[in-house]
Image: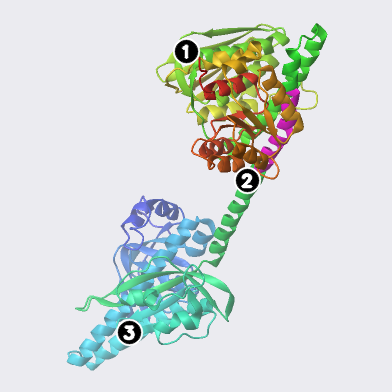
Amino acid sequence: MPKGEGLPANIFEVLKTSKYFGRYDSACLSELAKFCQVESYPSAHILLDEGAQNHDIFMIVSGSAQVLSNEEQIIFLDRPGDLLGEVSVISDGPTAARVEVKDPITLIRFNEPQVRLEGSPSLGDLLDKVFLDILTEKLRRTTNKAQRYEGAKKALLKSKRELADTELSLNTQRDILDAVLRSMSEGAVVLEPNQGIFQVNEGFLKMLGQPSVPADLTEWPRVLGLYLSDQTTHIPANRLPMLTALRGELVANMEIFVKNPGLPEGRWLLATSRLLETSGEDGLSGSVVMFHDYTQKKNEEAALILAKQEAEEQARLKTNFLSMITHELGTPLNVVIGMSDLLLSAGLGADEISQTRAIKNAGEGLLTMVRNLLEYNQLETGHALLNLQPTNLSQFLEGISGLGQQLAGIEGLSFEPDFANDLGAVNTDRKRLTLVLMNLIHNSVKFSKAGTLTLGCKKEAYGFLFSLRDQGVGIEDSGKHNLFKPFEQVEKGLNRKYQGIGLGLILCKRVIELMGGKIWIESTAGVGTEVFFTLPLKHAIDPNANRQKAQAALAMGVGFAKAYPMNILVAEDSKANALLISKVLGKMGYQNELAINGLEALERVRAGGIDLVLMDIQMPVMDGLESTEKIMGLSATPPSIVALTANSEDQVRKRCQDLGMKACLTKPLRVDQLAEAIINLAPPVKS
């Protein structure tokens, strides 16, 4: 088609001034502008011929055009923004009249099928809304003409010729409206204020699976099977979108479920209404209710919800599986590590000590790997909860440094602490801070052949800055982008030098972020690596000296029980674990009793004379949680209960606290932790 000069430079601005498009989203209009062309035509040029197929919509920029039927002008259009060709596009049928240029005209043109095919879903929605506005306006115009016709006829103010012309124009408009309604795939119900249903199109009947509808709107829910979104309750008659519209109220995206003998599987409809206003005294002349079939979208939403539920169930099963694995592996590892500790304090020879320490280190390494997997799963599923405790930070870091010196010494490395001894007390999650620091130390030891590891910590304005520096192999620039990705390692393949499962750093990152901090790494290949992380730790009251006393528990021997006398019941179904705990308590001077399940523990406590119960969580007959709950209900002063569990999940710890347990000790049982719990719970010795 020809193109003229002096055309608008910005199609978007023209669309923005249109009464049909201007009130919609600018982003959609910008996208629509990309599909538009600007064209100019001379007078008498035929834009659309009667009976022709048309898929283009024209918008007047300047000039004028006329719509002719039987060579008589029925519509004259000369306002910028007026549309041409829209009726044949909406009805997807041949043009009902000829459109001819009156005065030289400049137009914007776009192809509706192309816009829907190549444009975004939002652009298709915009066209649907504009088409609904056009249909509503044409209904309003038809009604206005009918009212003017009736008024003119009654008043006999018009000549017979004028009345005939008006009636002809009105019939033409109604024919166009009928053609539009018949061709629409969307459902449409046209209503008049006094007469009720004016017209129901075939698209709506197909949606209902019915050949017709009752004349009485109040019968629709029962006869047609119209339900609320619960799919079981018929829509109350007064909530039908048609009756709502007749009251002059708008309906916006009302969900309706349709199920009847013609639609046994059911169908979801979305109802929206437009009110028809006239220029007469009455103001309101009716309304149109549009129905959109969105069954596919509703089914997709249901499928997404089901998929989400299945994913959550899989996550729950995975968490339960990891918890079970942790318990099942933790039980024998508890014995391996605990017995190794007892052997190391039994006066073995140098070779035996070396071999026993190797057994213990291997067991602790395996247990760390299992716990890392469980911790990672908790963080991934959002189930991780912080367990903040007052902690003397300098003493805590001294303990970490002691472990770091042992690990570094095995590989011939040095380990130096670089922090002040007066960092003060803070509230922190000791278990998770230990996990972070030990993972970082293990990494530094693994990737260092010689040199010194330095653990630093200093107070900053935002909290504390931690650092760990090594003189190891460092990291090439090409490998740095994978450092904080799960299960990724700098080296890959069967011939890699360094072992591991690739969880250490990502686990540290997630834990640090959970605690409100951030982590980063500076590294140079062949020189070394330094890891930094920040934590916004708040100061707390310094914990008492019981921890230092607990560390000397085995050295005190039977004197410990004399200093902290208690009658202790061990509830543990594993014979190996029960033996280990009994031996540890024996070295501390206690003669404990044993229950092999929660029910036995309950009956023994009921008999009286028990001060402390060391309660395993997973046991047959009655588990430790149920047993604890029943023990707490026996009297106002039940014995103290301390949980013993290989499951380190936060939910388990919280459940123990909620039941009133005084502490939750994680297997493998450490002597100093058990001793500290006893010191905190033992009654004062009478002098």
Query: Which mark is drawn over residue 316?
Result: 2
Q: Is residue 558 above or below residue 36?
A: above
With 438 as the anchor, is 190 left or right in this view?
left
- Label 1 to label 3: alpha-carbon separation: 87 Å
Q: Which residues are magenta?
A: 320-337
Disc with the residue nearer the chain's start (2 vs 3): 3
Q: Is residue 54 above or below residue 320?
A: below
The residue located at (29%, 73%) in the rendering is 248
* Dots 1, 2 in contact, CB < 8 A: no
What secondary structure do most residues of the magenta stretch adopt? helix
Image coords of residue 525 (percent x, y): 65, 14
Quick one: label 1, few (<14), some, or many (20+) residues within 10 Å? Answer: some
- Label 1 to label 2: alpha-carbon separation: 40 Å
Residue type, mark 3 in image: Leu
User: Can residue 102 be seen in this snapshot?
Assistant: yes
* Dots 2, 3 in contact, CB < 8 A: no
| Residue closer to the observer: 518 or 152 | 518
Query: Which mark is drawn over residue 170?
Result: 3
Residue type, mark 1 in image: Lys
Residue type, mark 2 in image: Arg
Residue 325 falls inside the magenta stretch: yes
Q: Is residue 85 above or below residue 527?
A: below
Q: Which residue is mark 1?
A: 458
Name the element at disc 3: helix
